[in-house]
Amino acid sequence: MSKYFKLFLAIILSLTLLITISCSTGGSEDSDDYVTITSKTTHFEVNIDYSSGDRYTIGKEYGTKVLSAFPDYEKEVESVLVEMVAGLYLQDPNLTYEVLIERALEISKSAQSQYMNEIEGFASVLSGGTNNVLNDGKISRDEFLILNFNPDICTTTSCSNVAVYGNRSVTGQTIVGRNTDWFPGTRGQVGYVNAVIYSKTGSKQVVSFGYLGIIGNLVAINSDGIFVSNLYSATGGTYSAVGRRSVMLDIREAIETSSTVDEVAAFLGNPSRIYAYNNNMFIADKNVAKVLENDFDRNRALRVEDSELNPGITWGITDAMACVNAFVLKGNFDNFTDFPSNSERWANFKSMLTQQGDTNNVDGIKTIMSYSKPGAGGNDDGDIFWKYTVQSLVYSFSDNRLELWLHPATGEFNDDPVYTSVTIPFLDETQ
């Protein structure tokens, strides 16, 4: 064996040893290949692969890439938090910044470890660290918890859903409409961080609609064709965060592990899962839509189109389902009758569905979801689309067609929203 060949072998062995050491010391965990972020016209498209890798590492990469894609992330998002805290204080002087942090920390105790690891990883790259200083242009770890647990600690939202299916759907399969109504910031700052997030966990793929950095799901569709969204339903009870779960993290776990409408309902309606606020879960697939009414003090049950309702409340539309921020099942708390924003939206859903005839199509559902009373400036109790609507979507199962409107970065109300077509590639093969 020549001395040159021996030298060549020594070099190859050395390189092999270096590669082995790199892999054994976690070199692969540090590779930035779990998250991609692409800037679109109306939102950021985020792709996250949770199939392998450490969740803290993935969360850290997610945070790093968010700050790279939108350098003003902390400044703009914290500005919404500042305004939200000020608004809540006007409603209730006891609901302070410090109280919100206490509530968020309490909710985090019941959060799933894998999701908390993602949250901690993301928070590790934010400049606020452990310094909780409101209005410093930075996001601290605890402020990031507030943002992720917002529906669990200070909910004042009003969302809505409708769906047609079977004979009422022109396609024969479900067409679902959803509006999310949150505080968008006085300048519409949430428009800077709109996100459509595609994630993969094992055999399941999910698309969710929210904001950069939000780890849980409020509105989502999985690769089994299951749609889930949450609606707050107030009963006026005393608030407590002790032992309560994160509604968005539980929705995410449900949709990452379930394959049918009833499986999702069983998961989210499990008596062991108590949330800080009573809520409705709107769940649909290509054949049907149902509402899980989570009235913790009375009844946790699925509402279908012909369920018996509380006195004075009627539906009467076959192959259709609607939901506002109220319970309507017989025996559940009546936050409908004396609440105009609920009863009037319900009435508008009924009238507009029937005015469109015996069948409804995507454009018809889009007309309903974009309804606001002319000249009212998005402030009428019957408005389905109003000044605090931050997201409106219509999804048709038969042709995998999604029409999406996201609140732009402006403080002005737009009574003529323009929807954008968004693809869900992993559902194409199921049609």
Image: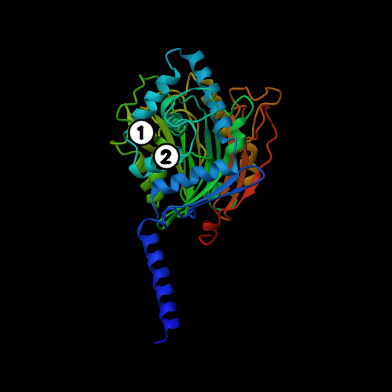
Circle 2 residues within 10 Å: few <14, some 14–19, many ≥20? many
Image side of residue 44 versus residue 303, left or right: right
Q: Can residue 376 be seen in this view?
A: yes
Q: Name the spot of residue 222 as percent of width and height, x first.
A: 46, 51
Q: Residue at x 68, y 27 (%)?
A: 412
- Direction front: furthest residue: 3
Q: Nearer the viewer, residue 412 or 359?
A: 412
Q: Please state which of residues 54 and 26 is positioned toward the viewer in this rendering.
A: 26
Q: Which numbered marker is on residue 72?
A: none
Instruction: Return the residue nearer the eye: 127 or 22.
Output: 22
**Residue 431 rendering spot, x and y as whole percentages:** 53, 60
Amino acid type for the residue under numbered disc 1: Ser
Residue 289 visible in image: no
What residue sits right under mark 1 in the picture?
108
Q: Position of residue 261 (x, y in %)?
A: 41, 47
Quadrant of the rendered image containing residue 348: top right
- Between marks 2 and 1, how big is the CA–CA gap? 10 Å
Circles 2 and 1, Cβ within 8 Å, touching? The answer is yes
For the N terminus, the image quarter is: bottom left
Amino acid on which disc 2 is placed: Ile
Q: Quadrant of residue 392?
A: top right
Q: Which of marks 2 and 1 is nearer the N terminus?
A: 1
Extreme residue toward the bottom, this view? 1
Q: Residue at point 40% right, 49% down?
A: 256
Disc marking residue 119: 2
Measured as percent of width and height from the top left, residue 295 is found at: 36, 29
